[in-house]
Amino acid sequence: MLSSSCDILSWFSKRDLAVRIGVFCSGGDAPGMNACVRSVVRSATAAGHEVVGINRGYQGLIDQNFFLNAKQQPIMGARDVSNIIQRGGTILRSARCQRFMTDEGVRTAAENLRQHKIDALVPIGGNGTFRGSAELVKHWDGQVVGCPGTIDNDLIGTDFTIGFSTAVETAVDAIDKLRDTAESHERLFLVEVMGRHSGYLALYTALAAGAEIACVPETPTEIPGIVAHLSQLQQTGKKSIIVVVAEGDEEGGALMLAEKLQRAECTFATRTVILGHVQRGGSPSPDDRMLATRLGDFAVKSIGAGATGVMAGEVNSQCVLTPFEKTFTEHKQLPQALIDLLECMSN
Ligand SMILES: Nc1ncnc2c1ncn2[C@@H]1O[C@H](COP(=O)(O)OP(=O)(O)O)[C@@H](O)[C@H]1O
Ligand SMILES: O=P(O)(O)OC[C@H]1O[C@](O)(COP(=O)(O)O)[C@@H](O)[C@@H]1O
């Protein structure tokens, strides 16, 4: 990992030539992807580059499905990204593309990039997207600098991913509402949040919503221990309980956990809520807009400086570049201090 943005820009030899940059969104959509597209376009046009928007991620690259502006030209100018910073989803649409996971798919995409004289790409997505980008650079000699767009916050090389802050806000807002019923009816709510392989969303949501427990894939979920803790809380006068469950928890999602708690004779009346895709939608938070704007610009500047095969991220408020390989071969650990903090709050 390179440290500061200054280090990185001086690391690569400066190149001031105008380039044609392709931008696309891939994998699960995340609030702030539009803000990132806008930033890439505005930063690139300010530097004299040209931007081509690619619809539907790698699928669009294979199908040559380009964003067309009002004049039906395959170019994204500064005005084409007006009024999107506040919009959730992505105007370029996103997709999961099976064909790109084959050698033939990657070669076709590379050939299309050559044919359309695209010099560089900014994929906005998660670790699957960057795994795909790592394959692409083996077959294409253009530059690829990605931006982390996923609500899961499961990427090494950035403290936070674009979309995470908004998803936490959405989940916390939902729990604040559920808490009314939990208190009125003296119930336990198991609230399932997204995160196939990561407990970041569950842990942050639990802390910010004042939940008692977070069940995450990174730490063992011990049913007898949870039941004992809950009954202890009940004895001290607790009337309602919120347990946040990451969908990827090793004991199963919230439904499975509810069954297991019941079998273990948990005394609380229990209800289960699966938040699902509402967590992926909505207007991005200011934090996500800021992060998306900084990283989109940094990705373009890094391309200008000659970088490739890397993801733009922000660590300790510094822009950094991390090789794609690291983003999908290494698991981003949950901060132990936050796990301990939740336990400390739950008494
Ligand atoms: N091993 C791979 N080889 C080539 N492409 C891949 C690979 N893994 C993922 N991709 C591409 O990246 C896309 C997005 O990945 P996915 O895991 O669904 O989302 P995310 O990027 O948000 O993690 C996939 O649909 C596929 O097209
Ligand atoms: O929208 P889908 O295809 O059901 O995917 C659901 C998955 O997408 C996510 O929301 C985001 O994951 P990715 O960023 O890896 O695409 C996961 O938390 C969830 O498991």
Image: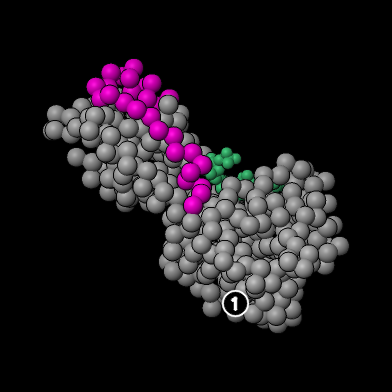
How many neighbours does mark 1 have within 10 angstroms: few (below 14), some (14-19), or many (20 or more)?
A: some
Residue behind label 1 places its C-beta within 8 angstroms of ligand 1: no
The spot of residue 271 in percent (x, y) is 34, 28
Where does the N terminus fall, quadrant-wise? bottom right
Residue at 62% x, 61% y: name it. Answer: 146
Can you name the residue that lies furthest to the left here? 236
Q: Is residue 336 left or right of residue 128?
A: left
Residue at 44% x, 64% y: name it. Answer: 286
Coloration mode:
one colour
Residue at 58% x, 60% y: name it. Answer: 34
Can you name the residue that lies furthest to the front here? 70
Q: Is residue 126 above or below residue 260?
A: below
What amino acid is labelled 1 in the image? Leu
Q: Is residue 36 left or right of residue 275?
A: right
The spot of residue 179 in percent (x, y) is 28, 39
Q: Is residue 227 left or right of residue 24?
A: left
Residue 297, image quadrant: bottom right
Q: Nearer the viewer, residue 180 or 20?
A: 180
Q: Is residue 129 magenta?
A: no
Q: Which residues are magenta?
A: 256-282
Residue at 63% x, 57% y: name it. Answer: 91
Q: Is residue 161 left or right of residue 65?
A: left
Q: Nearer the viewer, residue 90 or 213?
A: 90
Residue behind mark 1: 9
Q: Quadrant of ligand 2?
A: top right
The spot of residue 252 in percent (x, y) is 45, 29
- The local secondary structure at tag 1 comes to helix
Q: Is residue 263 magenta?
A: yes
Q: How many marks?
A: 1
Where does the C terminus fall, quadrant-wise? top left
Residue 16 visible in this rendered orientation of the protein: yes
